Image: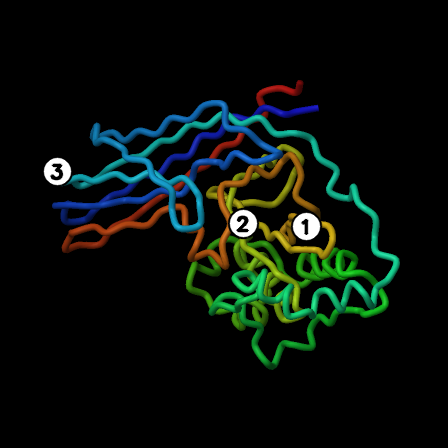
Amino acid sequence: MSYEYEIDYDTQNSYEKGLNEAFWQFLVIPEDNETQEVSYWHFENDLGERNSVSINGLGFKTVQVRSKKQVDHINFNAHFKVVKKEINPFDFELPSDLEAERAHLNSLEFKVDHEPYLRKTRFTTLPEQHRSYFEFDRSISIFENLTHLNHWTFEHLYFKTGVTDVNTPLSEIIEKRHGVCQDFTHLFCAIAKYNGVPCRYVSGYLHQGHGFFGDSQMHAWAEAFVPNVGWIGFDPTNDLLASHNHIKVCHGKDYTDCAPLKGVVYTHGANETKYSVFVKAAQQQ
């Protein structure tokens, strides 16, 4: 079975004292992979500025817009149609030899091959005083530990908007226990990496028709590498494994690699950006 989704991504940018020149880069186009296909996409702005499309350093498609018009606002709209395949994230066998799995995870070859996503960043470094909060159990498999970590993160944090931002340190998130999907994901990644499991931050869209937690912008979840299985998506915000409701845009070491909007603006006053995302299930096939 496959599922069709339509996605509307809107951003409204306003500038208190006007804008003289600007460059924006958007990382919002869903990727094509073995579980999803983009059948249509369109990106426009209300100033009629031209788009250019390129591939970033991590291999994901970006849209760039430049403007030298003197304006006090600009609005962007993107529309996507995506077909997702139904997948069973549990479709594999757990290892019978846990010591061999652990040895593989700790081998030098494995660590070299997966170094980029074992590397800790300022958002995915577990503070020393919190390293005993969640400990892996050597009597169960890596996948089972990650499933328990997914549930623990869901239980430890409370979803609440407006209490954190993209620069909130992990220590504050752990101590105050409130945040949004990117905070849940950073915490999951930090603990997984601390225990030697490669983990990457994923940015995308979530169909919330089943009552899942998410905000009015893009959703975030994690992908962890399980030996002899591969990358598996974990959504600690909703305590589930990523499935056909999760529409991937990109992955990286943390939010910094996956920020949906980056750019440079030349203005003397304050500026404000508002986002909205709407994901609609079109039909099942």
250 with respect to 91 (left or right): left
Question: Which residue is farthest bottom?
Answer: 129
78 with respect to 74 (left or right): right
Asked whether disc 2 touches disc 1, contact meaning CB atoms under 8 Å apart, the reply is: no
Mark 3 → mark 2, Cα distance in angstroms: 34 Å
The mark found on residue 69 in the picture is 3
Residue 140 location, quadrant: bottom right
Residue where numbered disc 1 is placed = 230
Q: Secondary structure at mark 2?
A: strand
What residue is at 66 percent from the left and 24 percent from the top?
2
Q: Secondary structure at mark 1?
A: strand
Which one is in front, 78 or 229? Answer: 229
Residue where numbered disc 2 is placed = 202
The spot of residue 73 in percent (x, y) is 22, 39
Which one is in front, 129 or 211? Answer: 129
What residue is at 22 percent from the left and 54 percent from the top?
270
Task: Pick whichever of labels 2 and 1 is earlier in the sequence.
Answer: 2
226 with respect to 60 (left or right): right
Task: Pick whichever of labels 1 and 3 is earlier in the sequence.
Answer: 3
